[in-house]
Amino acid sequence: MACLLAIETATTVCSVNLSVDGKTVFNRIQLENAGHSALLGVFVSEAVSYARMNQLKIEAVAISAGPGSYTGLRIGVSEAKGLCYGFTIPLIALPTLKIMASSILQQLGSGSARSILCPMIDARRMEVYAALYDENLNEIRPAQADIMDANSYQDFLGQQQILFFGNGSEKCKSVIQSPRAVFIDTVYPAAEAMIPLAEQAFANQDFVDVAYFEPFYLKEFQATTPKNKVLGIFNAKSIQTTI
């Protein structure tokens, strides 16, 4: 067991947790419109101050590694790396979808037995980032970007009940029609849900290279031009043409 600092910024949720021997001693979370760049530093500073006041030595930092928001993941990983360098401690990287699946197991306990777990992160339009796990968190199907339609997951639903959860599952309720499809609301990745996985990784010395670790984006970042900027360019060209 250890004193671990966990950081979760893969979605709109921003959260930081400090645990000792697998139990939360400090927790901060903002569920929506988090503004990760502004809040994360504050949450981490409070967690570090708490550790110092209580004479706790942080032994590792656990980060939610993706998939998820490109910007959120970059902010979280940068903060985690800075802490690891500053305190000379190792970095633990945990798959975001697996964190969500672990959260469901913690909430439902034996109620999730014999069900396939399908955490989903909204990837806009009718696309989600999703993976499939069994009740022991063994990966049945790796994370991938899925475009939702009536045939989604039918091969699995024909054999077993699937629990769908996460902010990506909302858009699937009207699309996936099966008596074996169960949708669970208000499930999101959070730092507190990372504790069991982080403890296990720490015990196994399952660390990543602080210098070279990169988040799992799943899809390449695509920059877009804001509409107001496009209109500005168009208007400027119109003016030049008129002149």
Image (cartoon, rainbow, N blue to C red):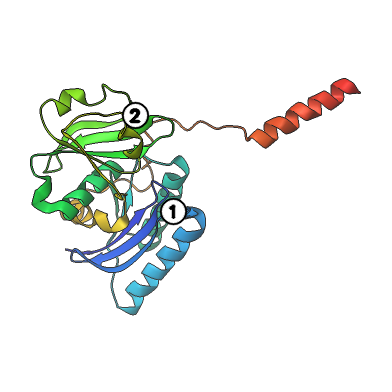
157 vs 50: above or below: above
- Mark 1 is surrounded, within 10 Å at the Cα level, by few (under 14), some (14 to 19) or many (20 or more) other residues, namely few
Q: Residue at x 33, y 27 (%)?
A: 148
Kind of residue indicated by mark 1:
Glu
Q: Which residue is mark 2?
A: 145
Q: Position of residue 146 (x, y in %)?
A: 32, 27
Kind of residue indicated by mark 2:
Ala
In screen coordinates, is 6 left or right of 31? left
Q: Position of residue 32 (x, y in %)?
A: 44, 53
Q: CA distance from mark 1 to mark 2?
A: 23 Å
Q: Position of residue 202 (x, y in %)?
A: 20, 55
Q: Which residue is mark 1?
A: 32
Q: Nearer the viewer, residue 242 or 180?
A: 180
Q: Residue at x 8, y 50 (%)?
A: 110
Q: Earlier in the sequence, mark 1 or mark 2?
A: 1
Q: Is residue 61 visible?
A: no
The C terminus, quarter of image: top right
Q: Residue at x 26, y 29 (%)?
A: 176
The N terminus, quarter of image: bottom left
226 vs 91: above or below: above
* Count of number-bearing discs: 2
